[in-house]
Every structure is written in C-alpha cells, then in structure tokens.
C-alpha cells in the first residue's frame, strides 16, 4: 500500500515572512515527514480588521522569495484570491479539493494562535480536515489549550524571538533587519519602500 501524501500548510499574514516562520515549517516538515509545506498568505485576516496590512500581492511575493531555495516549500494564492475574510476552514476545504482525499493535511501554527483556536470559524470541521501542529514561540508557554486529542500536536522548535511586528517596527525606526528575515526580503522591503510609516 502506498503511503498517503503528507502536506503541511503554514497559514499566516506574513507581513513580512521571517526566519521564525521558516524554521517552524522546516522543523515540522522534518518531524512529521511531510512531502511539502505550502505557505498560504492570508487575504483579509478575519481577526486583524482595522489594522494596516501590506497589500496581499507584496506579502505573497515575499513568501515566494523566502521559500524559493527550498524544493519542499511552495506558496499558494488560494486565500488571497478568495473574496472576503480568510478562514482556515476555507483554506483546508480548498486544499482538500486541490489535492484530493488521498492526502493528509497538517496545519502548522504558533502556540499563540493555537490557544485561540476554539474561537476560530467552524472548529469542528477544522479538526476533521487536518491535524494541527502548534510550535513553540518565545514569550508563549506551550500548554495544551484543551483541543481534541489525537488531532493536535505540540512541538518544541528552536526558539527564534522574531515577529513580523518587530521587523516592521525596526524598518520604520531605521534599524537593520538583516538575518531576522532572508536577504531577499530585506531587498524587497527596500525596493518597495514598505513599512516606512
Ligand atoms: N518566531 C516564531 N516562532 C514560531 N512561530 C511563529 C513565529 N512567528 C510567527 N509564528 C507563527 O506563524 C504563524 C503566522 O504568523 P504571522 O504571519 O502572524 O507572524 P507574526 O510574526 O506573528 O506577525 P505579527 O507580529 O504581525 O502578529 C502564526 O501561527 C504564528 O504563531
Ligand atoms: O479561521 C479562523 O477563524 C482563523 C482565525 C484566526 C487565524 N486564523 C489563521 O491562522 C493563521 C495565522 O494567522 P495570523 O493572522 O496570526 O497570521 C492564518 O492562516 C489565519 O487564517 C484563522
């Protein structure tokens, strides 16, 4: 019997994508023997309404640049092309349609996001569609938030105290972001004059 294809999905605003995201995806891919990790930048983040978010096309292109050198990483436009707010249940439904039933889906997320998962849209269906992997993040303790057993795993990854917020703040304040994000992202942010305030 052939093994089902194992597909990781890393959803995020990625404004901008940074090495914390990339390390988390790489560690989960290794630990869960994933064939591929698809980064899925959000369209309109349902819980970030009113926040000043960079256009989806820039966030998508930065994700492409950051993942280009890894043959097991790719980027999907499904969330940025779907009208309305982005809900993970729609991401998983679309991924399932694209990849068929013979594919196991693993949604990768930070421990901070996992803690709030019971408030997400259509939680019951979420756990039918995918296995959820919550990774450690500095500043957030890795505790079991009481999510259904068997469908959620918690995983320690090398701690990188990087956030997109800090990257944006540093650019605005004229501080370097070299080595917090891939080199191509530093150059893209400069070229497009992003986060200058
Ligand atoms: N340094 C990190 N280590 C582990 N997971 C992370 C890290 N940074 C972000 N994540 C996780 O990656 C996913 C997407 O993150 P997101 O794009 O919101 O980045 P962010 O750095 O949290 O952004 P912001 O500071 O704008 O809120 C989330 O599930 C988040 O918890
Ligand atoms: O589906 C939901 O209700 C929901 C609520 C909050 C966050 N999410 C997803 O969690 C991922 C991380 O979100 P963010 O905005 O913290 O980068 C991203 O893929 C979001 O679509 C999903």
Image: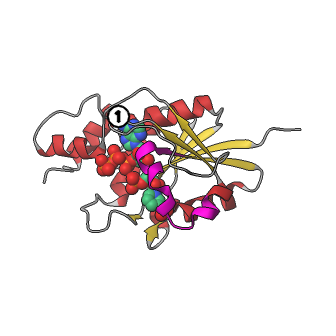
- Which residue is the site of mark 1? 138
> Which quadrant of the view contains residue 179?
top left
Q: Position of residue 182 (x, y in %)?
A: 34, 33
Q: Nearer the viewer, residue 195 or 47?
A: 47
Q: Residue 175: in sight, yes or no?
A: yes
Q: Position of residue 192 (x, y in %)?
A: 23, 50
Q: Residue 12: in sight, yes or no?
A: no
Decide: is 85 above or below 53: below
> Which quadrant of the view contains residue 18?
top left
Q: Nearer the viewer, residue 57 or 35?
A: 35
What residue appears at the point 51 percent right and 32 percent down from the top-left corner? 26
Q: Position of residue 92 (x, y in %)?
A: 60, 59
What residue appears at the point 33 percent right and 62 percent down from the top-left corner? 48
What residue appears at the point 40 percent right and 46 percent down from the top-left corner? 112
Q: Nearer the viewer, residue 149 or 18?
A: 149
Q: Is ligand 1 within 8 Å of the beta carbon of the residue shown at mark 1?
A: yes
Image quadrant holding the C terminus, namely bottom left
Decide: is 141 above or below 100: above
Secondary element at image label 1 = loop
Q: Position of residue 136 (x, y in %)?
A: 44, 35
The segment highlighted magenta reads: 108-126
């Amino acid at each position: 019997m052939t093994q089902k294809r194992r597909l990781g999905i890393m959803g995020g605003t990625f404004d901008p994508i940074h090495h914390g995201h990339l390390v988390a995806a790489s560690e989960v891919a290794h630990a869960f023997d994933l064939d591929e990790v698809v980064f899925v930048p959000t369209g309109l983040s349902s819980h970030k309404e009113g926040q000043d978010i960079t256009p989806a096309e820039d966030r998508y292109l930065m994700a492409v640049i950051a993942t280009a050198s890894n043959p097991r990483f790719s980027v999907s436009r499904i969330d940025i092309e779907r009208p309305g707010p982005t809900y993970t249940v729609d991401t998983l439904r679309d991924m399932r349609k694209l990849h068929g039933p013979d594919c196991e889906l693993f949604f990768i997320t930070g421990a901070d996001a996992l803690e709030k998962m019971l408030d997400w849209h259509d939680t019951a269906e979420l756990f039918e569609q995918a296995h959820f992997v919550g990774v450690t993040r500095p500043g957030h303790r890795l505790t079991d938030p009481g999510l259904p057993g068997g469908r959620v795993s918690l995983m320690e990854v090398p701690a990188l105290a990087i956030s997109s917020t800090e990257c944006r703040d540093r650019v605005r304040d004229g501080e370097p972001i070299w080595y917090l994000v891939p080199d191509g992202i530093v150059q893209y942010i400069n070229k497009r004059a992003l986060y200058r305030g």
